[in-house]
Image: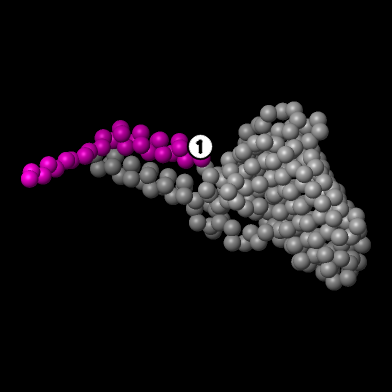
């Protein structure tokens, strides 16, 4: 039996083409850097003027803060909050903690995060009504305009394409409004509310029984209508957060990875590094 040996060689030109192809593919599928909320990330609710709760039956998992208005304008009790209620002074619900310094830093960090998210280069979604309903969106930065009735009617699906560290950033230059019984879901359950950000230039309103995901950063107010649930946080820079028999659950994002920070790089980034390195090595070996 005769064994035939084969010698495979790569020209520098082919190696460069391979590296370029890997780079372009990665750019097409890469997830954007996450938005750093800083100390605001520890709050499920952070508001400027007041926090109200119609019916007094909402449940909050995470910290609650109000600044610069005093804690007397917080309409939640310690029993409703699975975290700490922070106030700028002694006035506030029983069991609340006065920590003006923390709240000042958190509101400052929120402003920085809002500026970052709203300033990213974005892909505009079609105008008109219901820009988000029925869409399946991969990781990226998107913008949408004001809607006649609602920006989300039905279901918005976030497709992480298997990457648990996928990031979505949505920019609303006007308002964010969802219709009743609308929802935001992760395809196949892959994704984290920690990495979904909504930068709203005005106010955000979640319609009755909406199921929503992400960190809502509204320049003005955030309102949750009857029965709406939020997996994430409601952060209002200059106005109120209003509740009505709602559930807000803030995830523990401390272990969330990704490429921004100390997390392990995602698969695409790892392949890019390995593929590009191999291609460059082959190119130099042929010189």
Q: Quadrant of residue 22?
A: top left
Query: For residue 9: magenta?
Result: yes
Q: Nearer the viewer, residue 284 or 49?
A: 49
Q: Position of residue 133 (x, y in %)?
A: 70, 36
Left or right: residue 74 compared with residue 35: right
Question: What residue do we see at 72% from left, 45% from top?
Answer: 183
Whether residue 108 is visible to the viewer of this picture, yes or no, is no
Residue 265 image point, x, y percent: 49, 53
Mark yes or no: residue 19 visible: yes
Q: How is the image coloured?
A: one colour
Magenta stretch in the rendered image: 1-29
| Horizontal side, residue 279 vs residue 146: left or right | left
Q: How many marks?
A: 1
Q: Is 58 placed above or below 18 here?
A: below
Secondary element under disc 1, as helix, strand or loop, is: helix
Front residue of 212 and 258: 212
Q: Identify the main secondary structure in magenta.
A: helix
128 up-or-down from 155: above or below: above
Q: Is residue 226 magenta?
A: no
Q: Where residue 114 sits: x, y (%)?
A: 72, 46
Q: Position of residue 46 (x, y in %)?
A: 79, 56
Q: Is residue 253 left or right of residue 265?
A: right
Please name the residue shown 70% across and 49% down the image. Answer: 213
How many other residues sit within 10 Å of disc 1, few (<14), some (14-19) or many (≥20)? Answer: few
Tell me the quarter of the picture where residue 128 sits.
Answer: top right
The image quadrant where one finds the N terminus is top left
Query: What residue lies at 72% left-to-right and 48% top-to-bottom?
Result: 212
Left or right, residue 163 beside residue 214: left
Q: Residue furthest bottom?
A: 95
Q: Which residue is mark 1?
A: 28
Residue at 69% of width from left, 45% of height from top?
184
Quarter of the image where the C terminus is located? top left
């Amino acid at each position: 039996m005769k064994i035939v040996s084969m010698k495979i060689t790569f020209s520098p030109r082919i190696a460069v083409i391979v590296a370029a192809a890997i780079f372009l593919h990665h750019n097409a599928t890469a997830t954007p850097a996450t938005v750093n909320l800083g100390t605001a990330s520890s709050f499920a609710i952070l508001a400027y003027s007041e926090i109200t709760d119609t019916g007094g039956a909402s449940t909050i998992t995470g910290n609650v803060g109000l600044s610069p208005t005093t804690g007397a304008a917080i309409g939640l009790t310690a029993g409703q909050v699975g975290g700490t209620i922070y106030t700028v002074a002694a006035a506030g619900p029983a069991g609340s903690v006065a920590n003006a310094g923390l709240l000042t830093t958190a509101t400052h960090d929120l402003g920085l995060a809002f500026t970052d998210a709203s300033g990213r280069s974005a892909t505009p979604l079609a105008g008109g009504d219901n820009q988000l309903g029925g869409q399946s969106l991969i990781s990226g930065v998107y913008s949408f305009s004001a809607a006649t009735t609602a920006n989300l009617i039905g279901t918005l699906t976030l497709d992480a394409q298997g990457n648990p560290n996928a990031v979505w950033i949505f920019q609303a230059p006007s308002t964010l409004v969802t219709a009743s019984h609308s929802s935001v879901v992760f395809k196949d359950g892959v994704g984290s509310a920690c990495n979904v950000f909504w930068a709203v230039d005005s106010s955000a309103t979640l319609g009755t029984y909406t199921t929503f995901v992400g960190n809502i950063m509204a320049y003005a107010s955030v309102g949750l209508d009857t029965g709406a649930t939020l997996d994430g946080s409601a952060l209002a820079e200059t106005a109120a957060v209003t509740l009505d028999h709602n559930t807000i659950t803030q995830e523990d994002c401390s272990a969330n990875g990704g490429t921004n920070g100390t997390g392990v790089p995602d698969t695409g980034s790892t392949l890019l590094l390995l593929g590009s390195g191999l291609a460059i090595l082959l190119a130099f070996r042929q010189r």
